[in-house]
Amino acid sequence: MRDSRLSASEEAVTDGLLERDGLLAELERRLDLAAVGAGSMTMIAGEAGAGKTSLVNELARRAAGRARIMIGGCDPLSTPRPLSPLLDVISDPGSELGDLLEESSDPVRLFTEFLTRLKGTMRPTALIIEDVHWADEGTLDFIRFLGRRVGDANALVMCTYRDDELDTAHPLRMVIGDLATRDAILRLSVEPLSIEAVRTLAGDTWVDPDHLHRLTGGNAFYVTEVLAAGTEFPRSVQDAVLARVSRLRPPTQRVVEAVSVAPRDLSILHASALAGARPTHVDEATNSGVLIGTGDRLRFRHELARTAVESSIPTGSRLDLHRRMIDLLSEETPADLARLAHHAAMAEAGELVAEYGPLAAKEASIRGAHREAVSFYEATLAHSSRLSADQVAAIRFDLGLELAIVDRQAEALEHQLLALEHHRGTGDLWAIARTLVSLGSRYWANRQTGRARESIDEALEIYESLDAGEELAFALYVSATTFMLSRRRDAARRDVARCAAKASEVGSDRVSRLALLTEGTIEIVVGDPDRGIELLREAYERSSRAGDDRAAVIALGMLGSGGGEARRYDVAIEALEMDIKRGLELDEDYGVAYSRAWMARIAFEQGRWDDAAVYADLVAEGPSGRGSISPVTALGALGRVRVRRGDPGARAALEEAVALGEGGEMQHLWPPLCGLAELAWLEGRSDEIGGILEWVFAEAMRADSEWARGEVGFWMWKAGVIDSPPDRAAEPFDLHMRGGWREAADRWHQIGCPYEEALALADGDTDAMLRAIEIFDSLGARPAASMTRAVLRDRGVDNIPRGPRPGTMANPYRLTGRQAEVLSLMGEGLSNGEIADRLFLSKKTVEHHVSAILAKLGATTRARAIAAVGGLLSPQDGGTPRIE
């Protein structure tokens, strides 16, 4: 018989849903709108145990008669099952979507068809996706896909997640940020229970509600679990869970233990088989409130309860349950590779991990879940003693490819070097050459350009000796790409022509498309930019039509970064935005970071300096961290913004960029080095510029990049190190160095670079210099404006514009009024969401303001930003920055 105190507390939560009326009303309103074709997605946040599941279940209960209910969840597997919640939904016979399983190998097609089924229905759909903080990358892509398109569907999508488990690098944060500005997206928060709610739950029970509230902080799970224990108040949630389980009969306890070893849920048939239990024992487990029955599956009320039970099972018994779970799953068709690999790892069954791990990894990679593929490969290597040396080498090679995609470049290089070592030992020339080709890219990404060239050259020599076909064509593509990255035009054109010819000879459409892609990139950066743009667009279209997503994404990235370097900004920005969107959908961390870094650089060059800082922050906060080439570009842009604004931290950011790029290509290092040269010029240290730029100037002169020659040469000219422009310098720099300041300013204006336009005007007559000051002031370029004013004063010019008003000058960090408001509220300890509410702004807008504030203050955290303004905060007005 159930304990009456347990019943009272549970009914108060599940039936009454204390303090959740407002949330339920909003969800019901959204469901009503979905019924008339105005769909939406609601992100429901709360700490572990806040009551998110109870909330969406109550909505589902109320809507059962008027809406189609679909429920899926994410697994807390060590290596999550790709697209778990979507597969849950379409596998449910009640969904009538079983035919979509045929599309499951193509995520984009599957997503599109699923969305189609949500549109134009007689009844709205309430789709619940639980625990998306555990989501695999494929599921995150699915959420992003739906969030962008759900607005005209007859559906309310509800995603629950634990916001207290999301650190700054958690991939879900990026998804939420990407969707933040969508009108169809709503964010709700399930807050802790108040003391009044806890008193209601406690009722006439033995527990002191005030003490319970203080102890639990109002966490709904903690409160209900403590009340449900029915014994002396436990010291931890684990004690409460185990106390409830201990009151069950032994067969029922075995059911609970069986469910505990299966993350998220377990079928009743499997639970009964593992426990040797009858249906009555399953009923007892659910009636007691320890487990919840949903359809034909069993689960715990909370993951904390599941782990508490699982950890209490003696080691031998726990291993036996995992092994028996493998036996049950092995009988199913199709095999659930993710779960099999998980249980194999938990059972310490190395031979089974070795069997299922690589298969699960390949499945994850095909679905675009590259991080999950990495996890599976790493789990397999942990049991490498079960594999042959050839198998280990093959897994290391594939793992290196996946690690490169998720931008863990140093590890990618390490694994492929180990694979090469094995192949050299066996003398397998085909495997050696294949690995050397891949190592060329791995070396390049790790800023070892000399070794990259050596690796590719050796591979070409081997393939030519073997009279290889498509393999040689692909190696020539990598070779041409590497020459292009070094800005060596003739060598790049030579190898791409050989690549195209060989691909045509052997009939490889894939390599022909890659050759076209590389030819276009060569032209856009060191040849004819117009032809390059045309070729890259063709390469993107051909790759997309062929279903080659990776090549399509690379084409977009090359069009964006190459267009940026050629200063074709409209083309570049469009391509980069598309690349970021597709890269996020395909788990391309490296490509996303690189494109965001280029967005930062372009925004810097266009004078959109706040935007540049925001993009630089996104790169720094992304999963790649500092271990990739992208931070070199991002930090270079951020440092140059600080140089031109006169903000603190400029030298530090630029020197870090140069240090990170050491050993890498000239293309990445010339911008931050030019930033250091400009800083020296603004600070009156022009005699140091020759030393700063000596190496990169020599490299630029050996390379075929007109823009590198132009910008590096310009600062060498400014310092008096050279007295004429280098050969083949980019046109506006060349014009300026030849004395054609007016023509140079016009050209910069056409391109869209206001700061460079002002630099040219500042070398002109008095009227031009006055115009330069206007531009500098509009940009907030205080050092250059001050320098130009000083020159005019020395010439005896009167009526020079004063520049920013005294109130702005009293704020040496040049915060805008809105930024000062945001900083003041940061100082009060308010979160971004609370600041947004206070100022009637969107949270995304506040996030941008915070990023800009950090950039201007040279701070890496909110606390450091607040500390940095010290004396600017005015005690008499409650801490508002003094910008009067």
Image: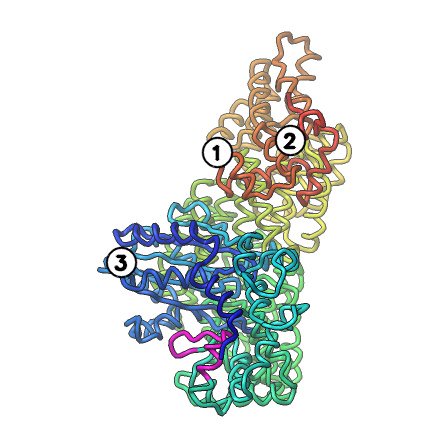
Label located before the other in sequence (3 or 2): 3
Q: Residues within 10 Å of mark 1 (few under 14, many from 20)?
A: some
Callout 3: SS? loop
Label located before the other in sequence (2 or 1): 2
Taking the image as shown, residue 836 lies to the left or right of residue 552, namely right
Task: Determine if residue 491 is in view.
Answer: no
Taking the image as shown, residue 85 lies to the left or right of residue 854, namely left
- The residue beneath circle 1 is 751
Q: Nearer the viewer, mark 3 or mark 2?
A: 3
Residue 40, position in %: x, y? Answer: 36, 52
Whether residues under marks 2 and 1 lie with C-beta atoms below 8 angstroms apart, the answer is no
Callout 1: SS? helix
The residue located at (55%, 88%) in the rendering is 250
Task: Determine if residue 243 is in view.
Answer: yes
Asked if residue 42 is positioned above or below residue 433 in the image, the reply reads: above
- The residue lying toward the viewer, choosing from 619 and 134, is 134
Whether residues under marks 3 and 2 lie with C-beta atoms below 8 angstroms apart, the answer is no
Residue 257, position in %: x, y? Answer: 55, 82
The magenta stretch is 282-297
- The residue lying toward the viewer, choosing from 270 and 555, is 270
Q: Nearer the viewer, mark 2 or mark 1?
A: 2
Q: Which mark is residue 645?
A: 2
